[in-house]
Image (tube, rainbow, N blue to C red):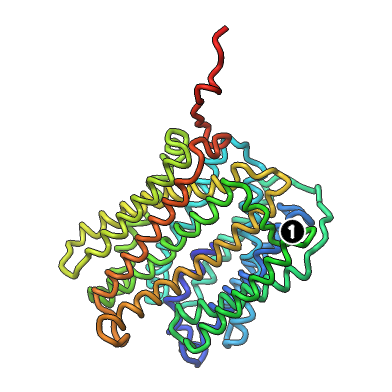
Amino acid sequence: MELLDGTVIATALPQMARSFGVSAVDVGVGISAYLVTLAVCIPVSGWAADRFGGRRVFLTAIVVFTLASALCGLAHSLPQFVLARILQGVGGAMMVPVGRLVVLRTTAKHELVRATALITTPGLVATVLGPPVGGVITTYASWRWIFYLNVPIGILGILLTLLYLPQDDDAESRPFDTSGFVLSGVALAVLMLGLDDVGSGEHLAWAAPLIALGVALAVVAIRHARRAAHPLLDYQLLRVPTFAASVWGGTCIRLIVGTTPFLWGLLFQVGFGRTPFVSGLLVLACAVGDVGTKAFTTRAVRTLGFRTLLVGASLLLALGILACALFAPTTPTLVILVVLFYIGVVRSFAFTGINTLAYADIPPAQMSAATSFASTLQQLSFGIAIALAAIVLHVAALAHRGSTAEYTVGDFRVAFVVVAAIGVLAALNFSKLHPDAGHTVSGRRRFTAREAPTPA
């Protein structure tokens, strides 16, 4: 619900602008406000779940997100819409990380791979389904239905939570890191604003100063966290090898997942002259590959182990992105569909691996801190992804023609090569893992001669 909402809205900006009597650029403030609110509030999710209980916070988050969605659909002016989006961001910031935390706390280690495969599917599918769903809604209905559709889904989520999620009333009175919240919140907000300016192509003069200021504030926030007794974002978690590998390698994979739908949509429409609707249908092949593979990801982790699976998936993903660099207006549609389907299959294995590996060796007492940390970086990496794609296209166009007035197929080829290189970086990161990394979760362990049992 949250991730589909975030990707659909971009296609409806012109229609919303006409409804509010403003420009499409002005309506983009609603997207920025939502992203900034997510970035600021996600670090609080772990503390809130510990303090008030995961079930209670998760249920409240669904209620807030659903109510805010209805308010977005009912908005009759831009200020009303922005305020509703901020409220929606508060709900979304708690909903996804705390929902994941509830699953991690109530799932046995040996079932974690299967559970992770299930809960990662909606997010991957949403990034691909968003553009075509948005195109259909804005073409055949009002933009308001983008938000009204969340209401029945949210009500269903509330009912399922009340029926199936166990009570967890063991609240932990951990003190709230106010200084860390302010420092990390301001740093993440400024960074997201700068990245959003780069990705949208608007207010570019502000982008570099904002990103530089955000990085500087982030350094201050990290130094504070390392000294604080109860930091909001615990960087000591990076001392756990499996968590660190998942963070750095996972960030690379998310950069690929975040940039490719953006590049595909522009390539098919600007480079090939396809309609937005046809472009969206082509990209659906990736979602089909993703969903169709989930039944096999658990077996793959247990058969290959995390290191082999993630190194292989990263390299295969890089090859798939390189194949996209060979697309041309004359490329048969069937070939494009096969390549995008293949990418969906490979990234399905990659995401199941990195999202399970992250929590394989995290003690139960640190699980909430780990989910907050990982969710914050996930949100930031998707913001970086769009900015990265826009920057690479911009630089390629300047290098080829000295102008960014219109992108060509050659510009997209450069962008896909750069994105493929990120996949190689991910493989190098995962190659440093121990062969038995995460064996308590994967169920696979290779015994050395020294560890082998001695015959009786």
- Classify the position of the C terminus by image quarter: top right
Q: Residue 444: percent from the left, percent from the top?
A: 50, 31
Q: Residue 11: percent from the left, percent from the top?
A: 42, 76
Query: Visible in this render: residue 167?
Result: yes
**Residue extending farthest top:** 456
Give the tally of numbered discs.
1
| 198 to the left or right of 140 | right
Residue 1 lies in quadrant: bottom right
Q: Circle 1: is it few (<14), some (14-19), or many (20+) Cα within 10 Å?
A: many
- Residue behind mark 1: 47
Residue 297 lies in quadrant: top left
Q: In the figure, 3 relative to 183: above or below?
A: above
Q: In the figure, 434 relative to 244: above or below?
A: above
**Mark 1: secondary structure:** helix
What amino acid is at disc 1? Answer: Trp
Residue at the (58%, 88%) spot, across then down: 77
**Residue extending farthest bottom:** 21
| 111 to the left or right of 275 | right
Query: Visible in this render: residue 71?
Result: no
Residue at the (55%, 78%) spot, across then down: 211
